[in-house]
Image (spheres, rainbow, N blue to C red):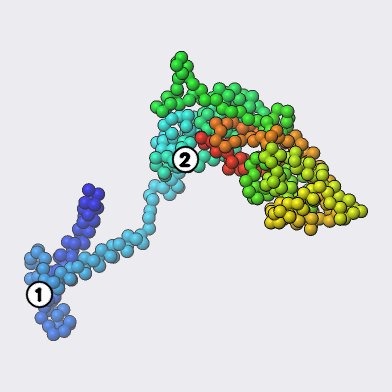
């Protein structure tokens, strides 16, 4: 059916050129009937023969005449095509632009029929959480940027309504600690559990069954009110080790400008070696900051005895004898090559200072903030504005983003994740 319609449209568009070509066959007939030995004589004779050839409305079917008609019709069609291709496109009435306010019809393809499965944008506009809608053209990412000053309602009129949707797991940055207090009970109760028909499920007593959230809190202001967080639980490769070391150094440098680049690189090598050893060689229950602090405390340096080897040196020597190409061994050898006795002493003093800043993050048995394949979860991060020096806001966001990146790759839940 579709092919027939295309052929019909093609014939209708080219009908004028076909008719003109058939009419032009009469000119071919007149030229054929003209007398003369050369072209000039034929042109003089054509004037007398042409009226007779045009008396009949029927086209000439002689092959030469049909060829003349085909050339005339084809040339005209080509001229029209080239003219239309190079023609300027005018949009009359739209000289000042075509922007307009959207309507309900414009946003309708982007909205999920089930209200709870949407990101609320305004009172009348929303965006489906479905990443694979029926029409792929309506697929959009779920990133929303809300800009407003203090008291403009960013939390009250956008964040809280979207938390109340309870369609997925959430990671909430809560500097003031008020969102947890105001929305925690709601999430703890959860949303009605939908059945196969999309309606809320009920128990045998006719009561609605709710699907509660698992509430988790990371509070860097008051660690007594915080759950334990073990970054070692999210290390899966050497790249993750470097990310953890970079984050640790950046977030424990204190106030003021950073020191010489040499010290930062040497400190990075030391941490990469120690954390690499802990990740690849230590038991799971010892893969935490407590073990890292114990390693640093055991790294004694004697200025009067350059040949002295502390327990950590002996530990790496034993590992090198078994696995000479081990990641931790390679990093530790680079560190020892770069840092002499005096340098090692200064670096260890810095490391001890950093370990004192991380003592509150010591986890119990390698606890994770997020686990794979667990039920829907809401993680609240209350991050201090005073922990990271003068550029606290920027560093706080950098730390949070770094943590989110690692957790998202290692945390797979049955539903979507919303931050």
Please tell me how crowded label 2 is: few (under 14), some (14-19), or many (20+) other residues with Cα within 10 Å: few
Instruction: Indicate which disc residue 49 carries.
Output: 1
- Compared across the picture, whether 357 is left or right of 108 comes to right
Which residue occupies 19% across, 62% down?
A: 18
- Farthest-out residue, right: 304
Which residue occupies 57% across, 25% down?
A: 187
Q: Nearer the viewer, residue 126 or 12?
A: 126
Q: Is residue 29 above or below residue 170?
A: below
- Compared across the picture, whether 185 is left or right of 250 comes to left
The total number of labels drawn is 2
Q: Nearer the viewer, residue 101 or 208?
A: 208
Please tell me how crowded label 1 is: few (under 14), some (14-19), or many (20+) other residues with Cα within 10 Å: many
Measure the alpha-carbon separation of dots 2 and 1. 75 Å
What residue sits right under mark 2 in the picture?
131
x then y, percent, for residue 246: 70, 48
x then y, percent, for residue 299: 82, 47
Which residue occupies 55% across, 38% down?
A: 412
Q: Residue 41 falls in which quadrant of the image?
A: bottom left
Mark 2 residue element: loop
Which residue occupies 7% across, 67% down?
A: 55
Disc 2 or 1, which lies upstream in sequence?
1
Q: Nearer the viewer, residue 301 or 202?
A: 301
Mark 1 residue element: helix
x then y, percent, for residue 10: 23, 56
- Farthest-out residue, bottom: 37
Viewer can see residue 106: no
- Farthest-out residue, top: 205
Q: Report the quarter where the C terminus lies.
A: top right
Q: Nearer the viewer, residue 242 or 311?
A: 311
x then y, percent, for residue 79: 28, 65
- Compared across the picture, whether 303 is left or right of 10 comes to right
């Amino acid at each position: 059916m579709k092919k027939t319609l295309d052929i019909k449209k093609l014939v209708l568009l080219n009908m004028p050129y076909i008719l003109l070509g058939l009419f032009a066959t009469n000119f071919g007939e007149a030229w054929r009937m003209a007398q003369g030995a050369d072209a000039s004589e034929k042109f003089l004779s054509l004037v007398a023969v042409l009226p007779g050839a045009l008396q009949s409305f029927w086209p000439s079917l002689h092959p030469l005449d049909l060829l003349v008609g085909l050339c005339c019709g084809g040339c005209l069609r080509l001229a029209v095509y080239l003219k239309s291709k190079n023609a300027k496109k005018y949009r009359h009435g739209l000289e000042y632009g075509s922007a307009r306010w959207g309507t309900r019809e414009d946003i309708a393809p982007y909205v999920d029929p089930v209200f709870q499965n949407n990101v609320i944008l305004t009172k009348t506009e929303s965006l489906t959480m479905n990443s694979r809608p029926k029409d792929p053209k309506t697929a959009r990412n779920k990133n929303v940027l809300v800009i407003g000053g203090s008291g403009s309602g960013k939390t009250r009129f956008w964040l809280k309504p979207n938390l109340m949707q309870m369609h997925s797991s959430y990671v909430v940055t809560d500097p003031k600690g008020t969102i947890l207090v105001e929305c925690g009970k709601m999430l703890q109760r959860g949303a009605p559990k939908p059945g196969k028909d999309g309606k809320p499920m009920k128990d045998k007593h006719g009561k609605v069954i709710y699907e509660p959230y698992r509430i988790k809190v990371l509070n860097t202001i008051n660690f007594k009110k915080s759950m334990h967080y073990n970054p070692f639980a999210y290390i899966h490769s050497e790249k993750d080790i470097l990310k953890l070391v970079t984050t640790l150094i950046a977030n424990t440098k204190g106030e003021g400008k950073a020191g010489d680049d040499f010290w930062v690189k040497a400190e990075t090598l030391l941490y990469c070696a120690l954390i690499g050893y802990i990740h690849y060689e230590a038991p799971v229950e010892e893969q935490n900051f407590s073990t890292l602090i114990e390693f640093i405390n055991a790294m004694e340096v004697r200025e009067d005895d350059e040949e002295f080897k502390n327990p950590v040196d002996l530990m790496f020597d034993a590992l090198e004898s078994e696995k000479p190409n081990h990641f931790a061994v390679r990093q530790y050898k680079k560190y020892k090559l770069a840092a002499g006795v005096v340098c090692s002493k200064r670096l260890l003093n810095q490391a001890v200072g950093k370990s004192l800043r991380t003592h509150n993050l010591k986890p119990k048995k390698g606890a994770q903030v997020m686990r794979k394949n667990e039920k829907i979860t809401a993680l609240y991060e209350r991050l201090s504005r005073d922990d990271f020096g003068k550029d606290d806001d920027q560093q706080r966001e950098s730390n949070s983003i770094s943590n989110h990146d690692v957790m998202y790759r290692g945390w797979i839940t049955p539903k979507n994740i919303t931050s």
